[in-house]
Amino acid sequence: MNKEIRKAQNIGLCFGVTCALQAVHEYAKDHKVIVTWGDVVHNSLVMDGLKQMGVQVVAAINDIKSSHIIIPAHGVSPNIIQAFNERRINIIDTTCPFVCRAQKTASAYGKKGFFTIVYGDKNHAEVKGILGWSGERSLATKDISELKKILNLPLKIGLLSQTTQKPSDFITFCQQVTELAYTKDSRIYITDTICHDIRKRQQAASELAQWADMVVVIGSPNSANTQNLLQLCSSITHAIQVEKAADLIADMVAGYQKIGVAAGASTDDAAINGVYEKLKSF
Ligand code: SF4
């Protein structure tokens, strides 16, 4: 029986990553030195391509020897921006509008005296940046038990999500926080800050997984939305993650007839088509 291979309906670079990469290429037209603050997108193949065209990645202020810096799509905290300004470093800001929305939400919570809780991975660069916008009275977690350890939760709590989280998980978390913290005179504010592209991408991957015997999710291990897609597909059918065609071997798909292909928001067409063609060749 022949294999059937289908790509997800929503696949390819997202709007935010596309804009960030365009900004880097635009800057590269007139400048020999191109410096980014960390990886401008979370995809090692895309980053390898940028490095080959001369992009330098720095992670410490003192390592910046250029007069400019490119801020990545996942944004930075205001204290980093302040440090750039103090050193008169020109900023090329590629922060995605959806990340900006989360940052502005966190900032508004902080200014209104709300304790901000970010539903997300506290070690992820985007979340670190968002926490910086909310101020000191904030934390990031995906685990309600961490909040249970806080004896007196503040009466005013503002909830928001890392842009790439699963909406259903965020809703469950908000319900848990409400059950834990809702008391006399409390105010709990919830803002949906999940990216629109991610919602569509997850929906498309979920539909694909319901059709498929297995799904190949393409993306880098440090891409949060790729990991969430993998988790989502794994909850429905067999799913594996690869970065590129070379990671695939025939044994991985042996015995599967209906194979789906999904990809993270920073996985480009070259990687997607490479995996797709390799799957067809088995
Ligand atoms: S995944 Fe969404 S939030 Fe992240 S860069 Fe893309 S469009 Fe922006």
Image: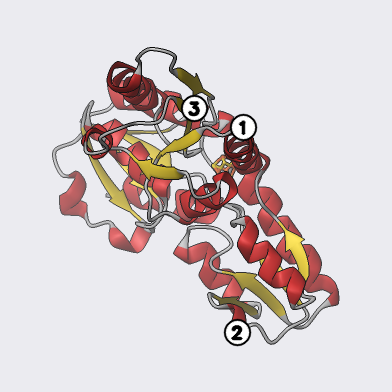
The answer to whether residue 222 is left or right of residue 80 is: left
Q: Circle 2 sits in a helix, a strand or a loop, which is it?
A: helix
**Front disc: 2 or 1:** 1
Q: Percent x, y for residue 16? A: 64, 45
Query: In this rendering, which labeled residue sits more in front, label 1 or label 3?
Result: 1
Q: Residue at x 42, y 29 (%)?
A: 202
Q: Is residue 211 visible?
A: no
Which three-letter amino acid code belongs to the residue tagged 3? Arg
Residue 148 percent coordinates (x, y): 23, 33
Marks 1/3 in contact by CB < 8 Å: the verdict is no
Q: For this rendering, which residue is in front, 230 or 99? A: 99
| Mark number displayed over residue 199 | 3
Question: Mark 1 packing: few (<14 Cα in 10 Å), some, or many (20+)?
Answer: few
* Of the pair 18 and 126, the residue shown nearer to us: 126
Q: Amino acid at mark 1?
A: Lys
Label 2, label 1: how far apart the Cα atoms are: 34 Å
Q: Label 3: how many residues lie within 10 Å, few (<14), some (14-19) or many (20+)?
A: some
In this orientation, which residue lies closer to the viewer: 281 or 129?
129
Q: Secondary structure at mark 3?
A: helix
Q: What residue is drawn where x is 38% and y is 56%?
A: 123
Disc 3 residue lies near ligand 1 with CB under 8 A: no
Name the residue tied to disc 2: 62
Q: Nearer the viewer, mark 3 or mark 2?
A: 2
Percent across and percent down for residue 183 are 35, 14
Sequence-wise, the earlier of marks 3 and 2 is 2
Does residue 13 sit above or below 195 in this rendering? below
Q: Quadrant of the N terminus?
A: top left
Residue 112 got which mark?
1
| Amino acid on which disc 2 is placed | Asn
